[in-house]
Amino acid sequence: MSIALTATPEQRVLAEAVRDYCAAHCTEEVRRAGSGSFPWPFWRGLAELGVLSLAAPGEGGGAGDIAAACTELGRAAAPGPLAATVFAVHALPADLAGPVGDGTGLPSVGEPPLLPWAPLAEVFIETDGREAWLARPVGTVQPVETLGGEPWGRAGLERLRPLERVPAATALSGIALAAYLWGAGRRLLGIAAEHARTRVQFGRTIGSFQAVAHPLVTAGAALTSAEKLTTMAALAIDGGHPDGAALAASARLSASRAAVEAAMVAHQTLGAIGFSVEGPIGPVAQRIRQFAASPGHAGDLGEQALARYSRKGRR
Amino acid sequence: MEFAWNEADAAFRRELVEFLDRELVGWERSETGLGSAVHSDFSRGFVRRLAERGWLTPHWPEEYGGGGQGAWQHFVLGEEMWKRGEPRGPQYMNVNWVGPSVIKYGTQEQKRRILPPITRGEVFWCQGFSEPEAGTDLAALKTRAVRDGDGYVLTGQKIWTSYANEADHCFLLARTGSAADGRDGISVFLLPLRTPGVEVRRISGFVGDHSFNEVFLTEARVGADCLLGEENKGWEIVRRTLAYERVGAPRYARAALVLDRMAERCRADGLLSDSGVRERFGQARALCEAARVLVYRVIDERAKAKEPSALANQARAAMVQAERAVGDLALDALGGEALVEGALGDAQFRNSLGAGIAAGSYEVQLNLISRLILKLPKE
């Protein structure tokens, strides 16, 4: 093993820029923005930083940059259809990808009838995880609220034409989700650890109880392995390695599991505080659970990860 | 050993189910109707109709307006209510442990004053235990009750007080001794929430319609007749109360029902032909059944008038596991539809998050089990 699973200097600069931007602009109000109040200025600011067009074919920053940026967005619990944007920018023809990459039009990527971000979306992409089509909604979009506070909608779709680069777009959006999830998980774990260091019960800080400490440690280890797997998958994709797509699926599964675990542990550590809508973890935990259970073809992830091994077996 | 319900209990359940099917038309508001919903107007009317049939407090002695029935009938009632999202609203607290505590520790005057409105379904009670600095470590509570003439003056703050905004009275813990006395300086007060100096503020939470509140007490003056039991002897009452609370809400009954509805949907979608999915369903079902028999053991104990034991902690821990397993499966198996607000997955996930915290944290249950059942030393 001679490849370092750490960020390149360029990725560190990008991560720092996103972190600084979020520190200044991802306010509590932006973070909580639900349906009907999409934080457009924040989203366009991300576009100006180049974050929303990182996946543009040929000119984008590649999987490593996507991972670096999305991790920071996860840490900041930033809102918005990030993974869908990555997918759309990579798979759409340049004229249609433009508005998505410059933050003026939101994409909806999914399978009817339940479509993420449909009430606000300007571009609709139908995908089953293998193929994807540019599409348009049939009839009116009926909005629904979701666990993670995202505005989704019900509508039929009419396929207009098939899109290219779908496997690569799927892998890149998998990287974006994986990176966001482990970043968000790390945020919650940090809050929980801080609470465990300072909250006193029975005359001791609660972190001195092993029943509190050990789950935090275990969740941290899972997040670290998800982080490394995400980095590895991004390196494989950027290096054109044949395992890239399968590793991206593994990274997404691993980060989903780790982030959900971190969310559960954070809730258990903070107790009732976690249930307050104004509290520091509730809405983030719900968004994590939503991303981890992402709709449509999520059930195929295990198969995609397994495909790597069956392919090897056939060799 | 007898595994089946006896004829009287089974007949009671049949009659109850028929009544509920009739009464609760229109009550199920979401896709599932399985949220921990409280619509206080509906609940206030509904519990009066239950009371008319003697179904609010069937397990209480007849002299206090009860039906003189056993603990099992009361439990059948709890299962059927909980399955339907607890249409009694916060009333389950009254019937599970507020009333029983007054029956056991109250004066004759208190019993005459407090019990009849509960059996008639006219009042809601809430539980004023947790404070900002006293959560799991309940004995660290700081709310003070200072003796003043023929009464007490209460000052302090409670938090996470479920349904305080709906309630008429609060089963309140306050310190009558010094802080150094720990659990030996705590007393129980039966506080009317309309008392001057009591202020309730809502906290927005995300578990269904479940309401959390802060309760601020600023020199609220109550009579000595509000003290339950002896001064400084409140901890014993609390221990008993918590034992009732731990299994008072048969959460597995709702989890099992959620699981059944999920299975129906997955079968319709052809997902149950997948052996991986089937195994998850089987495991979750087994956890619900395990919780059920462990809770039954606690009810058996109660029916035989034994002292509450660590079986209640074991049952509670099993219920937490069952709720979590069903919540996880709902989100994994039902795809995007599970995420829609009010859908099975969304509701069960929100509920399962609270399972390991309400009525004593999961970790505390495990600690008690390790000490009391496995006889392991304290940390």
Image (cartoon, rainbow, N blue to C red):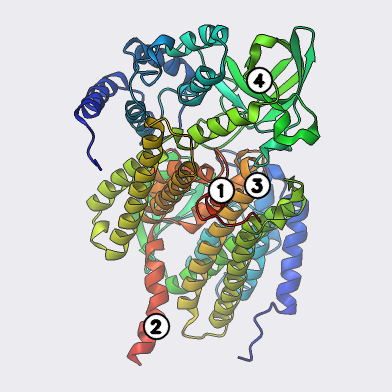
Q: Is residue A197 rendered to the left or right of residue B287?
A: right
User: Which residue is identified by label 3?
Assistant: A270
Q: Residues within 10 Å of mark 1 (few under 14, many from 20)?
A: some
Q: Nearer the viewer, mark 4 or mark 3?
A: 4
- Toward the viewer: A36 or B39? B39
User: Which residue is identified by label 4?
Assistant: B230
Label number found at residue A309: 2
Quick one: SS at disc 3?
Answer: helix
Q: Residues within 10 Å of mark 4 (few under 14, many from 20)?
A: few
- Toward the viewer: B374 or A292? B374
For marks 1 and 3, give the CA distance.
Answer: 20 Å
User: Which residue is identified by label 1?
Assistant: B368
Quick one: SS at disc 4?
Answer: loop
Q: Nearer the viewer, mark 2 or mark 4?
A: 4
- Toward the viewer: B98 or B93? B98
- Compared to B244, does B360 lie above or below? below
Residue contact between numbered discs 2 and 4, judged by CB atoms under 8 Å: no
**Dot 4 falls on which chain?**
B
Q: Does residue A52 appear anywhere in the picture? A: no
Q: Same chain, marks 4 and 3?
A: no
Residue contact between numbered discs 4 and 1, judged by CB atoms under 8 Å: no
Q: Quadrant of residue A175?
A: bottom right
- Tell me what residue is drawn at x 78 percent, y 59 percent: A20
Q: Nearer the viewer, mark 2 or mark 3?
A: 3
For marks 2 and 4, give the CA distance.
Answer: 70 Å
Q: Same chain, marks 2 and 4?
A: no
Among the two numbered marks 4 and 1 on one chain, the one whose residue lies closer to the N terminus: 4
